[in-house]
Amino acid sequence: MSPSPHKLIRSNDVHPHTGFNKWLAVLITTGVGNMWFFYGLAIFIGGWMLGSKLGWIAFDPYPFALMLLIVGGIFQALAMVAIMVGQNVQTAASDARAETDHETLDAIHKLSSQSVEILEGQNRILALLEKK
């Protein structure tokens, strides 16, 4: 049995989106999808509200319509699309790695089966030699 070349699946290299679009979508997905971004956004919103209350931000008084438009509307709509594309890229890479793992485990199973057959054959030969 000749060894077949093993394919190595690197992170996010199997999705149809390529180049800058794929890079940006994965960057946004990993950047927005963590707690540090949440903390930063909470500090930004809290700072905006505090700044408005103390008079530092006079152009957006309570109920903070501009902040809510930026954070709740524009940012959310753009982030949602980018996160979906990034998740698709990450899912395609994960699926490809799972397929490669399956192929690797299948090859290991075949090699193990062949090893067992060889050992059983050697045991039969040893048993014949002991009889002589």
Image: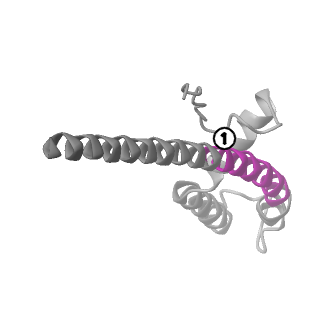
Of the pair 123 and 54, the residue shown nearer to us:
123
Of the pair 111 and 13, the residue shown nearer to us:
111
Residue 91 picture location, percent across and down? 70, 51
Q: Is residue 51 magenta?
A: no
Q: Residue at x 67, y 39 (%)?
A: 12
Point out the image quarter for the C terminus: top left
* Mark 1: secondary structure: helix
User: Which amino acid is tagged 1?
Assistant: Leu
Residue 44 picture location, percent across and down? 62, 57
Q: Is residue 90 magenta?
A: yes
Which residues are the magenta region? 75-97
Point out the image quarter for the N terminus: top right
Circle 1 crowding by C-alpha within 10 Å: few under 14, some 14–19, many from 20: some
The residue labelled by disc 1 is 27
Is 18 positioned to the left or the right of 93 in the image? right
In the rendered view, tell whether residue 126 sits above or below residue 20.
below
Of the pair 55 and 107, the residue shown nearer to us:
107
In the rendered view, tell whether residue 69 sits above or below residue 20.
below
Q: Write down the quadrant of residue 41 in the picture.
A: bottom right
Residue 104 picture location, percent across and down? 53, 42
Q: Residue furthest bottom?
A: 63
Q: Residue at x 59, y 26 (%)?
A: 5
Is 39 positioned to the left or the right of 58 in the image? left
